[in-house]
């Protein structure tokens, strides 16, 4: 795996060319749906010419294919959006590009981010970076895999109910799902609007911290964003660390609990205070999630009606679009159908 520091002091064109070559050499993992090769090399040349500067100047990255970007279609891994070329870019992409980062491709996902394995893509499944016989996790599986394969130092994903955290663990990389509202959702295909969050994958915590610092902040186009919520951390003194009682029961994998306890022992040794806290409402969390998310998904997918977005209905007029359906319903009611 690579880090952002590996790209400093090098030609941006060389960085991008190497990343694209790496992507083409690992096509058997099916982690990418498209490359933004032409646009990426143009931006790389601008970086080398000093026309684009910033903290990520010349650093290549990959974005989950539910972010609106230039240079390749935004499909959300659905054939419905197969030829959709976005008229704008997501705020997160704009912020990264303002710091000189270069998007080289769009990562595979469960279609419209509905899934937990990246097997539900209309374009085929992504394979695990460590073991091809296992799933990549999802829905941001493609982004996790390209990070683990190492031809880019970081990749972007979205997380509604584990879609960054789970594939990060499956592929052995760092994945961060920040607090809701930390990063603007503007320009990202919605799954469940009140729980969708924008985060990233990297091989180390320091790289995630830098990328999140760049992406975070208020956006006039997203009223749910938080102002100045995330910033690069200063060295901390002793802290109070809360351990949620309901997350440390026997239902949690024994190895996971052991690793958490080992970390807490190190925290205590470093002078921090560890306290157990209880959140009884957590027993209702899963039920609440499925009620809220299912309702919001239904609402958000209603726009894909064959008229306004993506693949269009093939009909001569509006009456023809709905005609067959209206006729069938009328016949059912006439014949006593429900």
Image: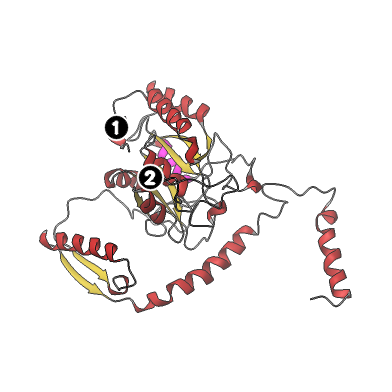
Distance from Cα at disc 1 to Cα at disc 2:
22 Å
Magenta residues (range):
91-97
Which image quarter holds the C terminus? bottom right
Inspect the magenta stretch and tell me whether residue 41 lies in it: no
Contact (Cβ within 8 Å) of mark 1 with mark 2: no
Residue 217 in view in this figure: no
Q: Estimate the x, y position of residue 72 in percent, counting from the top left.
A: 56, 36
Q: Which residue is mark 1?
A: 6
Q: Estimate the x, y position of residue 335 in percent, counting from the top left.
A: 88, 75
Compared with 230, 49 (above or below) is above
Q: Residue 267 lies in what quarter of the image?
A: bottom left
Residue at the front extreme of this rendering: 133
Q: Estimate the x, y position of residue 203 in percent, counting from the top left.
A: 31, 43
Residue 232 in view in this figure: yes
Q: Residue 295 lies in what quarter of the image?
A: bottom right
Q: Estimate the x, y position of residue 250 in percent, counting from the top left.
A: 30, 73
Which disc number belongs to residue 114?
Answer: none
Inspect the magenta stretch and tell me whether residue 92 lies in it: yes
Q: Which residue is mark 2?
A: 130
Question: Callout 2: few (<14), some (14-19), or many (20+) C-alpha neighbours within 10 Å?
Answer: some
Majority secondary structure of magenta residues = helix
Describe residue 8's horizontal placement relative to residue 271 as left or right: right
As helix, strand or loop, the secondary structure at mark 1 comes to helix
Q: Earlier in the sequence, mark 1 or mark 2?
A: 1
User: Which one is nearer the viewer's eye here, 191 or 32?
Assistant: 32
Question: Callout 1: few (<14), some (14-19), or many (20+) C-alpha neighbours within 10 Å?
Answer: few
As helix, strand or loop, the secondary structure at mark 2 comes to loop
């Amino acid at each position: 795996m690579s880090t952002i520091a590996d790209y400093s002091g090098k030609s941006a064109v060389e960085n991008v060319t190497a990343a694209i070559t790496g992507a083409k050499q690992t096509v058997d993992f099916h982690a990418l749906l498209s490359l933004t090769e032409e646009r990426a090399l143009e931006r790389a040349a601008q970086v080398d010419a000093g026309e684009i500067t910033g903290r990520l100047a010349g650093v290549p990255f990959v974005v989950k294919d539910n972010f609106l970007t230039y240079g390749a279609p935004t499909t959300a891994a659905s054939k419905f959006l197969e030829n959709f070329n976005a008229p704008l870019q997501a705020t997160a992409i704009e912020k990264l590009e303002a710091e000189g980062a270069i998007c080289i491709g769009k990562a595979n996902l469960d279609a419209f981010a509905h899934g937990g394995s990246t097997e539900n893509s209309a374009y085929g499944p992504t394979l695990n970076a460590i073991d091809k016989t296992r799933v990549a996790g999802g829905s941001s599986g493609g982004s996790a895999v390209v990070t683990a394969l190492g031809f880019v130092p970081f990749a972007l994903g979205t997380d509604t109910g584990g879609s960054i955290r789970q594939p990060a663990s499956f592929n052995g990389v760092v994945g961060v799902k920040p607090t809701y509202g930390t990063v603007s959702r503007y320009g990202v295909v919605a799954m469940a609007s009140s729980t969708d969050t924008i985060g990233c994958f990297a091989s180390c915590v320091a790289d995630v911290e830098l990328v999140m610092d760049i992406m975070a902040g208020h956006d006039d186009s997203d009223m749910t964003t938080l102002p100045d919520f995330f910033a690069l951390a200063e060295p901390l003194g002793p802290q109070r660390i809360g351990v949620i009682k309901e997350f440390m029961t026997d239902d949690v994998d024994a190895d996971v609990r052991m690793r958490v306890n080992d970390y807490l022992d190190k925290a205590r040794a470093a002078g921090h205070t560890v306290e157990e806290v209880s959140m009884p409402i957590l027993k209702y969390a899963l039920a609440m999630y499925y009620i809220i998310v299912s309702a919001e998904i239904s609402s958000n997918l209603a726009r894909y009606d064959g008229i306004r977005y993506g693949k269009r209905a093939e009909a001569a007029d509006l009456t023809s679009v709905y005609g067959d359906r209206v006729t069938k319903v009328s016949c059912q009611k006439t014949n006593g159908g429900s």
